[in-house]
Amino acid sequence: MQISDPGAAAEARVARYLNERGYAFAVEPDLGIAKRPDFVVTAAGHTVVAEVKAFDTYGMFTDAVPNQLMARSLKEALRPIRRQISNAAVQLRELQGRGWPLVVFLDNPAGRPIPIDSPYMVVSAMYGDIQMEAAVSTDGSLGDLRAVAGRNGKLTNDHPYISAVAVVRREDHAAAWAAQWFDTHQAAFGDDVIALAAAFAEASATDAPEGDEIFLEVFEASSPTAVPLPRNVFNGPRDLRWVPNSERTGLVPLPLGPQ
């Protein structure tokens, strides 16, 4: 599907999510600052201010040359994500100190080649390129490996007032159904790809569900000066949240459900 205005599409998807969660919200309210935020959300007794950013760039593929091998560093691949986090944070800067959680929403409704589908890439964009570390004992054996944030993080020093980054996720019901159908039936057809395709087409015509689902993957900030985003906000049945580890050197996943 061609999307002419990814920004408007992203804002519409965030509004849909908020409506489906039953949250009250205002669009671009006047808070007495130069740039009005996209949303002020009231949920579970809390007020949250949000700025939404989408992607209308081909990122690390922008200057790709046909028939040539392309190599890009992690820093180059993450630049579009870091740029939009920074752009949103700058627009929210004047609201720091008012006691509200400030949240950056990121969405990619146009399906641009941005590595936002991987949570580890989002963590890297926020807090620095992911690197692996493990303790080495006296006998030379390694302890457990863990991922920690390294260099080039966008929130580490630049925007410590941001409470969280929330990535909008979408799951097509038919795609999820198709994956489950193949898992269940593929073995029965062996190498007969034609029969498998015919059976799938027949089942799709009658059984494939319509519609899609919008949910969030929320990445909390580790900054001690940011107003925390309450964990009973943006906690739908499909939502996920990443939270600082005990040493506050990285983020770890925390599945969420209704609270």
Image: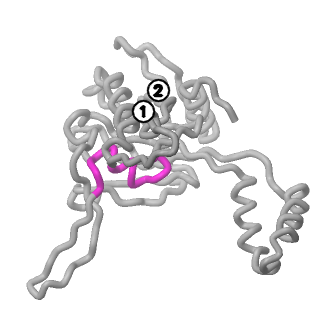
The magenta-colored residue range is 115-130
In the image, taking residue 228 as reference, residue 18 lies left or right, namely: right
Q: Is residue 166 above or below residue 246?
A: above
Q: Amino acid at mark 1?
A: Val
Residue 80 picture quarter: top left
Q: Is residue 89 above or below residue 81?
A: above
Q: Residue 121 at x, y = what percent?
A: 39, 50
In the image, taking residue 71 as reference, residue 154 lies left or right, namely: left
Q: Residue 158 at x, y = what percent?
A: 22, 33
Q: Residue at x 71, y 72 (%)?
A: 183
Q: Is residue 254 above or below residue 31?
A: below
Image marks 2 and 1: residues in contact by CB distance under 8 Å? yes
Q: Residue 225 at x, y = what percent?
A: 21, 38
Q: Residue 117 at x, y = what percent?
A: 50, 50
On whether residue 123 falls in the magenta region, the answer is yes
Residue 48: numbered disc: 1
- Which residue carries the number 2 mark? 40
On whether residue 122 falls in the magenta region, the answer is yes
Which comes sooner in the sequence, label 2 or label 1? Answer: 2
Outermost bottom residue: 139
